[in-house]
Every structure is written in C-alpha cells, then in structure tokens.
Amino acid sequence: MATTCEPDDPTGTVAGLAFRPMVTRETHGLGYVRVDDDPNVAVLLGTMDATGRWDATIRLRAWEREQLSVVAGQRLLDVGCGLGDAALVLAAYLGSEGELVGIDASAEMIAAARSRAHLAPCGVRFTVGDALTLTEPEGSFDVVRSERTLQWLTDPEAAAAEMVRMLKPGGLLSLIDTDWSTFSIDVGDSELSRQVQQTMQIERRRSSNIGRRLGELAKGLGLEMIGHTSATQHWNSWNPDELPAPDGCFSMSSLAENLVDAGQLGVDDQQRFVSTVHAAAREGRFAMTLTMFAVVARQLSAG
C-alpha cells in the first residue's frame, strides 16, 4: 500500500509499507523503518491517507480497477496493503462469495486496515506477513495487487515472483510503484534542482526507481502484459507556515539530510537549502513532481 513520500530506507529490509523516521523528532522525515514502535504513528497513518488522495494515486487506482475487472466470487490478495483502502474499494466487487486478503509487515497498519473493513461485502482477512515469503496457498488467487511496495524491499524480483506463485492460471497481477528518479523540485534555483535530481537518480540501499522497470519485471516472470500506464503527481503550492510538509510528503529538512547523505549537499548548507525552499513556497514559487507507473499482466500457467 501507499507510503509516505520518502526516498530512502537505510535498512533495505522492509517487507511492507510501514515506516519510522530515522530521527524520531522529525514527524515528516525520509528514511523510514517500522511504524509499530514509533511515537508518531498517528502522523504516519495520516500521511498514508494523504497519499491515497493524491490525484496520481486516484488515477492509477481507477485505471487498475478497469484493467482488473474484478467480479463476484473472486479471491484478491493485496501485498503491502497498508491501511487497506485500495483493496477495500476492489472488495466491493467481490460479493458475498469472494474474499480479500491483505498482508503488510506492520501490525499497526493491519490494525488500521481491519478497523476499516466492516462494510466490505466479502470475507476479509488482514494479516501481518512478509512479501518475500508469502504463506498463502499457492495458485489460490484470481488477482494479486501490490502498490508502492516493491521499492522498499531487499529483493523486489523475488517478491514479485512470490506474488505470481499465488496466482491461479489466468490470474492477474497488478503492480503500482514509484520511480524516484522522476522526482523534481523547482523553486527558481537551478543548482538546488540539480542537486535534488542527481540525488534521486541513484538507487541507494533499495530499488527506489523500480517503477520504470515494472513492465520488464512482469515479462521476466513469464506474464502476458495486459496494460501499462503512468501518472505524475504535482505539488504547485505549499505554505510551510501552515503545514510541516507538502501534502502527503516529506519535510524539506529531511530532504536536505538525504542530499547530505548522497554527497550533493554539505552539512553546513542544510539550513540554507531549507530556507531557500521555504522562502520560495511562501512567495508562490514552489513546484514538485513525482511519477508513478502501473502494469497489469496475466499468469499463463500454474508455475
């Protein structure tokens, strides 16, 4: 399920989409680990809800629904389900004979998903699990989906193979993920924009640019491509005096820390970076973009 807008996971071990800021006082930070023991759980849940309201997320989920054409009686698996919001929308089509199973690494996310499941017409089961080692019966799902999960995994190819293993012959796999190399920020400072772009181009400790490779990944697993698309999220305004971060995203302090880690910004320049972005935002000169990709593919065999 959707994450907050964080381009770096220092552990590279996350199997789901629940994260904790590396610096606990930073409630809108990048570099998340697990959410379950974090004092800012409510902030993280709220931020994940915000990403679900992004225009790009809404467009991709609508496209996914059209491609999947879920019908009554089917079984649906959501790997990295987070708060369960996307899967529960699809559950409305499954009917009383269908079933939704959601898996996430975080017990906090699973608890939140369970609290939202009471109106689903089908059977619903949200469980804590590992995307790299799925324990559901092999070949038992008509549809498997995963949204903005692969970018956080140590081995996205292995996780995708696990998802394919869950599919019935003819079943459909839907993957939605971010390509952080597309992230850009424009505040009227070309050097600042270049530093951010250079930082995001390189995958460090995780597959942050997996979005652009989803089609290649699906074909490599022997699937038949049904469709592919992309959507770009735009932030065209933000008041840093009212909100600590752009809607559903990270703070500029946290972004500056990431640039320092990538060697694009000196430690002494962090505050200048943050001040430059904040000043531009206050003056209406702030813009950011980020592109996500989606594919739907069909399993042709039982293996």
Image (cartoon, rainbow, N blue to C red):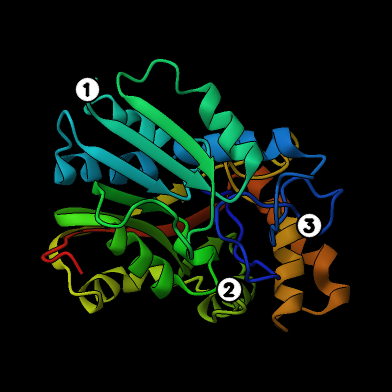
Which corner quadrant of the image does residue 134 belong to? Answer: bottom left
Residue at x-position 38% and y-position 53%? 146
The structure residue drawn at horizontal position 54% and vertical position 82%, both measured from the top left corner, is 202
- Give the residue pinned by disc 1: 95
Give the Cα distance between marks 1 and 2: 53 Å
- Front-most of residues 210 and 161: 161
Depth check, front residue: 122 or 87: 122
Locate residue 268 relative to residue 60 in the image: left or right.
right
Direction from residue 28 to residue 96 in the image, left or right:
left
The residue lying toward the viewer, choosing from 252 and 9, is 9
How many tags in the picture?
A: 3
Considering the numbered disc 3 on the image, is that residue within a helix, a strand or a loop? helix
Residue 37: quadrant of the picture: top right
**Badge number at residue 190:** 2
Q: Amino acid at mark 2?
A: Ser
Question: To which residue does mark 3 refer?
Answer: 275
Depth check, front residue: 135 or 296: 135
Looking at the image, is mark 2 or mark 3 earlier in the sequence? 2
Residue type at mark 1 is Gly
